[in-house]
Image (spheres, grey):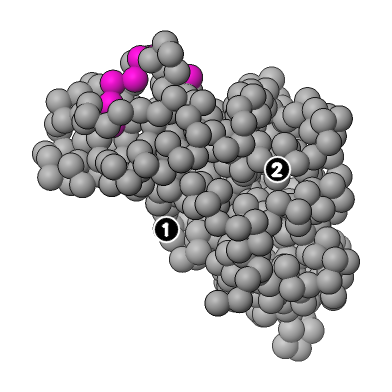
Amino acid sequence: MTTPAAPTAVPGTPGRVFVARLEGMAVFDPLGDQVGAVSDVVVVSGASATTSPRAVGLVVEVPGRRRVFVAMTRVTSIHPGQLIITGLVNLRRFEQRATETLVLGQLLGRRVRLREGGRQVVVQDVAIAPTRARQWRIEAVYVRPAERGGALPALGRLTRRTRTPGELLDHTAVDHLIPSAPDRVTTDLLASLEDLRPAEAAEAVMEMSAADRLLVCSALDVERLADVLEQLPESEQVEILANLRDDRAVEVLEAMQPDDAADLLGELGDERAESLLALMDPGEAEDVRRLLAYDADTAGGMMTTEPVILPAQATVAEALARVRRAELAPTLAIGVFVCRQPLETPTGRYLGMVHLQRMLREPPGTALGDIVDEDVEPLDPGDPLATITRHLATYDLISVPVVDAAGSLLGVVTVDDVLDHLLPDDWRSQDD
């Protein structure tokens, strides 16, 4: 059986990827273990009429026929026949939101009109591509003329009798490509935040009225909202989280750094905080609960539980690949912490740290255990803020390990977390 010519996916990342080619593609973690297979791609409308719709995540079918959500920010590469993601997969069952559209399930095969001339066409495929801001957006649409008798089958389901030539068009050529969209007021507000950095977006959100602020935070995608929340004063964080539905609040907390999530939950009432923790992924909740056990102004209360941790036999090349990840905060990319198994906090025995500058001077095959710095004294989780600041200044560090009495690495305190505790509570709202 032959099919008409169709656009070919450009393999690898970055580059244009046609969504129909992703259906059933195997999804692997960084260690090469298969997580599942791509079931669909989730897209949402752009913030304005001229902004392309954004692909926010994948629906991945994991063992047990459970469909789960994986954010596009977790995708590290796409090659023929395989897609690689980073991080742990949240196994909570995927539930589609009102503003979300499934490309394979709802968009392909849909009749739409072209902006010029109003000709009716049927969507056969869409091409997504990553932007410099690490967002994936619909870049082009592959369409065929709508024929009498109903919509054409989606790409990959074409029959021999379907020989109508297709067209690859820019997304702006199609009117109302994505059927669901926020209302106009929300769209305009979202457009004002589109190209801002998280800190700038947070400032813009603070200048909005309380009603507009909640409107925007309800419409922002989870990863973006988490980034913005981390830059807001605690009072605004609490106000926003308190007005979110439980399922959305949980997703936001899981997307935040564990220490930021713990700080936010610590400001909520005990009943509300406990109800949200109970709904979170057990692994994520465990990290946050451990942080909540410490006073906020101690090393244990300020640390993040997700630094880059590798075994002594790992090589410089492996370490550089880990710290090169775009989603890793610069303060955590400055070094690698070497430990015995297990490599998730709390780890096995902490051996020392390897600084990025040292790794850049060594051959790629050098084992981390051969260049580990054992001279940096780790902090105790109960150490107060004054001890932490002296420690960072003494060793000229950006981040410092926190180790318990058994010698296990619990987490890392970074200089930005220390600054948040040293600056006045309202420093974000103060004029220059």
Q: How many numbered marks, from 0 up? A: 2
**Residue 332, percent from left and from top:** 40, 43
Front-most of residues 62 and 283: 283
Q: Residues within 10 Å of mark 2 (few under 14, many from 20)?
A: many
User: Residue at point 23% right, 21% down?
Assistant: 313
In the rendered structure, find residue 264 and report the number of the disc placed on it. 2
Pointer 1: what residue? 14
Task: Identify which amino acid the numbered label 1 is placed on.
Answer: Pro
Q: Is residue 218 visible?
A: yes
* Picture quadrant where residue 257 is located: top right
Does the segment drawn in magenta span residue 273? no
**Quadrant location, the C terminus:** bottom right
Q: Residue 243 at what x, y percent from top left?
A: 87, 50
In which quadrant of the rendered view does residue 314 lie? Answer: top left
Q: CA separation, marks 2 and 1?
A: 35 Å
Q: Where's residue 216, x and y in %?
A: 78, 64
In reply to whether residue 348 is colored magenta, the answer given is yes
Residue 306 lies, in percent from the top left, at 48, 34
| Earlier-in-chain disc, 2 versus 1 | 1
Horizontal arrangement in the rendering, residue 336 relative to residue 244 (left or right): left
Region in magenta: 346-353
**Camera-side residue: 5 or 80?**
80
Please give the name of the residue rendered at 16% of the width and 30% of the height, measured from the top-left corner. Answer: 371
Q: Is residue 9 above or below residue 34?
A: below
Q: Is residue 284 visible?
A: no
Residue shown at 51%/47% (left/top)?
Answer: 417
For the residue labelled by badge 1, is the local secondary structure a helix, a strand or a loop?
Answer: loop
Which amino acid, by three-letter code, is at mark 2? Leu
Q: Are marks 2 and 1 in contact (CB under 8 Å)?
A: no
| Label 2 element class | helix
